Amino acid sequence: HLSIRRQRQMCIRDRYEKTFARRAAAVTLHVAADAAEALLLIERIRPTLIITDLVMEPFDGFHLLKVLQRSPELSRIKVLVVSALSPAAISERGGLPPGVIVYRKRLVQERFEGFLDAFFLAATKGHMVQ
């Protein structure tokens, strides 16, 4: 079970790395193994975008988002949640903070790339960096 999860994580990481490599040269992808590592990384690098799942261990993405919301600086970071949880299941677990974008798994590559294009275009104020 753990090796299947690890293989799936590596496939997802590979997919993100390839997708980001096709984007602007100024984009750097940082990957965390879990939410605890993610929080340490977020504190250190202050990213402009966080992509996260909600179901993680040792604590979940809901906890990660709550911690981010408690910090005035970190709460401004744009968050994209990619989750297999239904809207009802997300709501049952307390919902998500305002402004969090949710895409259901299995995320279609074109939709993900469209999100990134729009995000980077907005982040560069309309000056797309190639």
Image (spheres, rainbow, N blue to C red):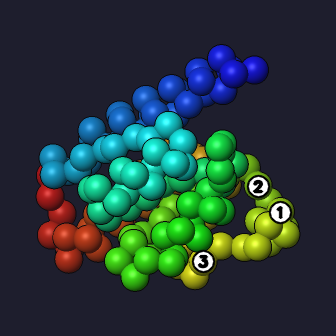
Q: How many marks?
A: 3
> Residue 36 placed where, x, y %?
52, 48
In the rendered image, which residue does mark 3 sit on? 97
Residue at screen point 19% across, 70% down:
124
CA gap between label 1 and label 3 equals 15 Å
CA gap between label 1 and label 2 equals 6 Å
Q: Secondary structure at mark 1?
A: helix
| Quarter-of-image position of residue 9 | top right
In the rendered image, which residue does mark 1 sit on? 89
N-term-proximal mark, 1 vs 3: 1
> Residue 58 placed where, x, y %?
65, 43
Q: Is residue 75 left or right of residue 88?
A: left
Q: Nearer the viewer, residue 19 or 6?
A: 6
Residue at the top extreme, as displayed: 3
In the rendered image, which residue does mark 2 sit on? 85
Q: Nearer the viewer, residue 14 or 6?
A: 6
Position of residue 67 relative to residue 2, above or below, is: below
Residue at screen point 35% across, 77% down:
73
Q: Is residue 87 visible?
A: no
Position of residue 20 relative to residue 51, above or below, is: above
| Quarter-of-image position of residue 14 | top left
Q: Is residue 110 left or right of residue 62?
A: left
Q: Nearer the viewer, residue 23 or 91?
A: 91
N-term-proximal mark, 2 vs 3: 2
Question: Which residue type carries mark 1?
Answer: Ala
Nearer to us: label 2 or label 3: 3
Question: Which residue type carries mark 3?
Answer: Pro
Position of residue 119 relative to residue 61, above or below, is: below
Kindly check if marks 1 and 3 are in contact, taking CB atoms under 8 A apart as contact.
no
Q: Secondary structure at mark 3?
A: loop
CA gap between label 2 and label 3 equals 16 Å
Question: Which residue type carries mark 2?
Answer: Leu
